[in-house]
């Protein structure tokens, strides 16, 4: 018995559906004669030929971010709204958003529509195909100057287009009163 473990690094999608990945194994040489098959002939009905197929799950995750005030005064509070969306076609499991605040912004509160917030990670867990979840993140503006806040979304199923929309940034430029 030979056990092979593999990870799909690309998939074929046709008509919005993930196509199966087929693995083929065939005896190509035998030191003994086999009376009911011929090694390496590509005949799928013979007992020296076997296939296994798997259809990978996909979750095209996306994240967007807005801020309620892009030019706050130092000492004020601003709220970032982060939206994570599963564009499918399958359920996203272990979905999470990493949201690291830049210096000059201090965490005040966070309210996720689903899941939990801890440290700099919003753990959504499962997100159905076509579903979205939001996180409201309120911060205190401590210092002046441009602050760029970035969120990155990920999930365990394979994302067929990871660089297209998995990161969202929004800047605030706090003003210092004279």
Image: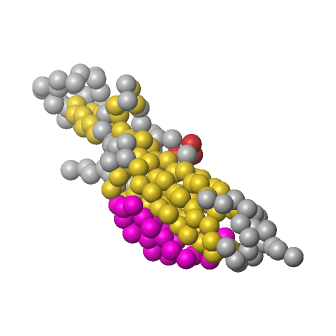
The reply to whether residue 92 is visible in this rendering is: yes
Return the residue found at the far right: 178
Going 25% across and 28% down the picture, which residue do you hit?
39
Return the residue found at the far front: 178
Q: Where is residue 165 in the image (x, y as percent from the top left)?
A: 55, 46
The reply to whether residue 158 is visible in this rendering is: no
The one nearer the camera, 73 or 39, is: 73
Q: What stretch is highlighted in magenta?
A: 101-125
**Could you say which quadrant of the image residue 44 lies in?**
top left
The one nearer the camera, 55 or 67, is: 67
- Classify the position of the C terminus by image quarter: bottom right
Display colour scheme: secondary structure
Q: Position of residue 123 (x, y in %)?
A: 41, 65
Going 55% across and 50% down the picture, which residue do you hit?
64
Going 35% across and 34% down the picture, which residue do you hit?
18
- Please say if 6 is above or below 43: below
Q: Position of residue 115 (x, y in %)?
A: 36, 65
Q: Position of residue 147 (x, y in %)?
A: 72, 65
Number of residue marks: 0
Going 23% across and 21% down the picture, which residue do you hit?
43
On whether residue 96 falls in the magenta region, the answer is no
The one nearer the camera, 156 or 165, is: 165
Q: Is residue 3 left or right of residue 66?
A: left
Name the main secondary structure of what is drawn in magenta.
Answer: strand
- Please say if 131 is above or below 41: below
On whether residue 112 falls in the magenta region, the answer is yes
- Please say if 97 is above or below 102: above
Q: In this view, does 131 lie to the left or right of 143?
A: left
**Could you say which quadrant of the image residue 45 lies in?**
top left
């Amino acid at each position: 018995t030979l056990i092979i473990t593999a990870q799909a690094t690309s998939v074929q999608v046709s008509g919005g559906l993930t196509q199966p990945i087929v693995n083929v194994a065939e005896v190509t040489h035998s030191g003994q004669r086999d009376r009911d098959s011929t090694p390496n002939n590509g005949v799928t009905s013979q007992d020296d030929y076997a296939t296994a197929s798997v259809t990978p799950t996909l979750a095209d995750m996306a994240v967007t971010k807005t801020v309620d005030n892009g030019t706050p005064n130092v000492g004020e509070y601003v709220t970032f709204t982060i939206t994570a969306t599963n564009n499918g076609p399958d359920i996203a499991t272990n979905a999470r958003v990493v949201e690291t605040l830049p210096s000059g912004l201090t965490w005040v509160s966070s309210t996720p529509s689903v899941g939990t917030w801890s440290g700099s990670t919003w753990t959504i867990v499962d997100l159905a195909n076509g579903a979205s979840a939001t996180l409201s993140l309120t911060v205190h503006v401590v210092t002046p100057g441009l602050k760029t806040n970035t969120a990155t979304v990920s999930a365990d199923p394979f994302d067929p287009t990871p660089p297209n929309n998995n990161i969202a940034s929004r800047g605030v430029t706090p003003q210092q009163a004279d």
